[in-house]
Amino acid sequence: MRRLHFDALKPICPTCRRDALVLEPGAQATSNAVVSGVLRCLDPDCGERFPIIAGVPILVPDVRGWLSANLPLVLAGDVEDAAVEAVISAAVGPDSAHNITRAQQSRYAHDHYGDLFEGEPDGAEPPPGHARHCLAEVLRHLGIGRGPRLDLGCAAGRTSFDLAASHDAPVLGVDLNWPLLRIGRGILDRGLLRYPLRHGGDAYERRETYHFPPEADRVDFWIADAQALPFAENTFRLVVALNVLDCVPDPARLVAEVSRVTRPGGDVAFATSLDRAPQATLPFASLEGPDALATMIAAANHDTVGAKPLRPTGPPRDLAWSVDPQDAGAIAYRSRLMTMTTAAD
Ligand SMILES: [Zn+2]
């Protein structure tokens, strides 16, 4: 956890949402980052404590629940040798939790970083990484003001680096998925991009390269819940939520949270699949058509303190999106990008 981000964003307790967090004494830290430590809620009736593990603060409302579900992933070390990894993959089989996690890492990391490896198609339309393509569209239309930027559902983190490259401000990427966040974290901590690339079944290739994006010192990655963000109202100048609305149990709550943490007059962008993506949660799938989506966004603010109305800054844009799950051929999707601003009153 970079001190730059902690000081600039002043996170609040995601459990009680009443008070700020302080770093307990005894943390393992350098002058600009905390590697391991505990953040504690200052509210005397709450006092919840949140661990910082391998540089990543875990700032979710139910920290026990998240740790119970994710601890094996958090504690799993890297297998340093590709040959050993291949034996492990084959032994446990494609349906094991180990390989399901790796398949997900493969899908997202290849989408985010595939262009950094030789032999990848260059100049293809849409370019590798739908989220990057969406973000490039966002930055063509938004993001001229100064202030911190939030990449909500950042996954493997490439869009967070892209957000930081376009402007001199702290950028925070948040996600609930530890194995995906760890890929971006490796770039921050060691300049090392490493992920498994699936070739079908339990066959994987290890992808590895050094990658030192110059903007990395403005980027940090935290575990946080998009539906219960650990920030006070009006913290961010720009919030992007790309391909995440359809992945949460309560999309309207996510929208309200985004408007709450965005400054008045700040910019917001949502991009989401228009087709029925396989990962879509039931509440999202029940929204019939793009008009229902716009209606949900417009109506989402009513019962969240600090939430603000969101006004479109232009017409929605439909973008092509080609997903290649590597063993099933490319599937063409469409996604809708909506750029909005928070009301100033
Ligand atoms: Zn608290």
Image (cartoon, rainbow, N blue to C red):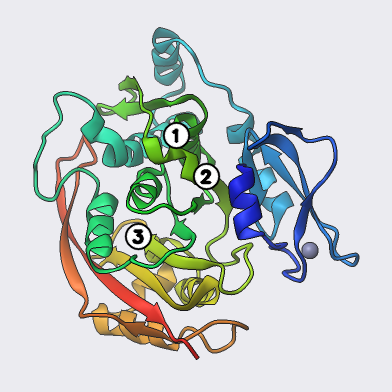
Residue under label 2, please give it: 220
- Image position, residue 168 (x, y; %): 41, 52
Which mark identifies residue 183?
Answer: 1
Quadrant containing ligand 1 reads bottom right
The amino acid sitting under disc 2 is Asp
Q: Closer to the N terminus: mark 1 or mark 3?
A: 1
Q: Secondary structure at mark 2?
A: strand
- Badge 2 crowding class, 10 Å Cα cut-off, few under 14, some 14 to 19, many 20 or more, is many
> Which residue is at a point 39% across and 14% down the rendered structure image?
86
**Of the residues tagged 3 and 2, which is closer to the observer?**
2
- Up-down relation of residue 203 to residue 345 (above or below): above
Residue under label 3, please give it: 242
Looking at the image, which is closer to me, 344 or 306? 344
- Badge 3 crowding class, 10 Å Cα cut-off, few under 14, some 14 to 19, many 20 or more, is many
Looking at the image, which is closer to me, 188 or 228? 188
Q: Secondary structure at mark 3?
A: strand
**Of the residues tagged 2 and 1, which is closer to the observer?**
2
- Image position, residue 135 (x, y; %): 28, 57
Q: Judge from the rendering whether residue 112 lies leftward or rightward of residue 251; answer left or right.
A: left
> Which residue is at a point 73% across and 50% down the rendered structure image?
64
CA gap between label 2 and label 1 equals 12 Å
> Which residue is at a point 43% across and 64% down the rendered structure image?
146
> Which residue is at a point 44% across and 88% down the rendered structure image?
299
Q: Closer to the N terminus: mark 2 or mark 1?
A: 1
The amino acid sitting under disc 3 is Leu
